[in-house]
Image (tube, grey):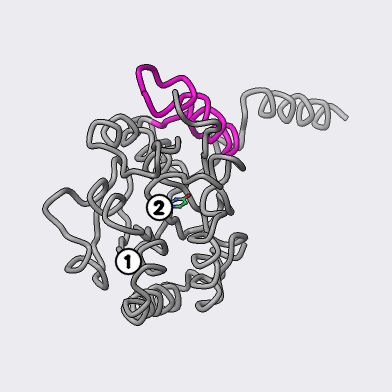
Amino acid sequence: MKVNNKLSKLIKYYNLINHNLIFSENAINRCKKRDFKNETKNLTQQLNDLERSISEIKNCSLKDYATKMVFSDGNPNSKIMIIGEGPGANEDKEGLPFVGRAGQLLDRMLKSIDLDRDNVYITNVVNYRPPENRKPTDEEINKYLPFLKRHINIIKPKILLLLGSTALNAILGNEVVISKARGKWYEKKIDKITISIIASFHPAFLMRQPEQKKLAWIDLKMIRQKMKDSGLKKIALK
Ligand code: URA
């Protein structure tokens, strides 16, 4: 009776002082600084925060002409992220990337390697439509680039597909040209994460130059192979 009493007191005491921690054989890591702020924020919260930050960008004339911000489409849990140039008229109307004719071609390209918008994540270099569908200027690209890099670091893709020269130059620098850079894998650290990057022709360019589709097909097959080699398909489809 006495022993039981003592024992139950002891158990209460250990519970109180967290005995699991005391009896654990794992070393306590007191040194590694953890990013608690972001760990506790889930993916949706982080994306919502980013979307709000983009909506608050000041002194950007793109916003004077565009009707809607175009943030992203697809599956934020995907390990395959696709970056285009910027919204066109249809995207500006709907607030979603790649919904016009170039988007329909992109969907067919994805389908050819068994992908769709449920297992890739899509965004653009700039989130507002440049007037008259012109290319975004360097100044505009540089304004949106920190937000794009933050976007990439939230999604943490294993594969990044850059569609066209605007996305290519924004991410890999102005020294590279799409005709030479496409069809090759690049490993690059973007802020905190290292990603396999491949560039290919923009679907709008492929509509104007359909004979280049055979090269785009090579790039798509490289992505399919990479997914296979790194067991990525399952992760992307989760
Ligand atoms: N072209 C792009 O680069 N992005 C879109 O969202 C649509 C067309």
Tag 1: Cα neighbours inside 10 Å, few (<14), some, or many (≥20)? many
Which quadrant, please, contains the C terminus?
A: bottom right
Q: Which mark is residue 200?
A: 1
For ligand 1, tell me if the residue under mark 2 lies within 8 Å. no
Q: Say whether marks 2 and 1 touch (CB < 8 Å).
A: no
Which quadrant, please, contains the N terminus?
A: top right
How far from the left and from the top, in percent, is residue 193? 33, 48
Query: Residue at coordinates 73% horizontally, 30% vertically from top-left?
Result: 11
Name the kind of residue labelled 2 in the image.
Ile
Considering the whole magenta stretch, tell me its main secondary structure: helix
Q: Which residue is mark 2?
A: 83
In this rendered view, identify the residue nearer to me: 30 or 46: 46
Tag 2: Cα neighbours inside 10 Å, few (<14), some, or many (≥20)? many
Residue at far front of view: 132
| Labels in figure, total | 2
Q: Quadrant of residue 149?
A: top left
Tell me if residue 48 is in the magenta stretch.
Answer: yes
Label 2 sits on a secondary structure element that is strand
Label 1 sits on a secondary structure element that is strand
Q: Which mark is residue 9?
A: none
- Against 176, residue 144 (above or below) is above
- Against 100, residue 59 (above or below) is above
In this rendered view, identify the residue nearer to me: 156 or 206: 206
Query: Residue at coordinates 11% horizontally, 53% vertically from top-left?
Result: 175
Chain-order first, disc 2 or disc 1: 2
Tell me if residue 166 is in the magenta stretch.
Answer: no
- Against 194, residue 114 (above or below) is below
- Against 86, residue 138 (above or below) is above
Stretch of the chain drawn in magenta: 34-63
Horizontal side of residue 146 vs 155, given as left or right? left
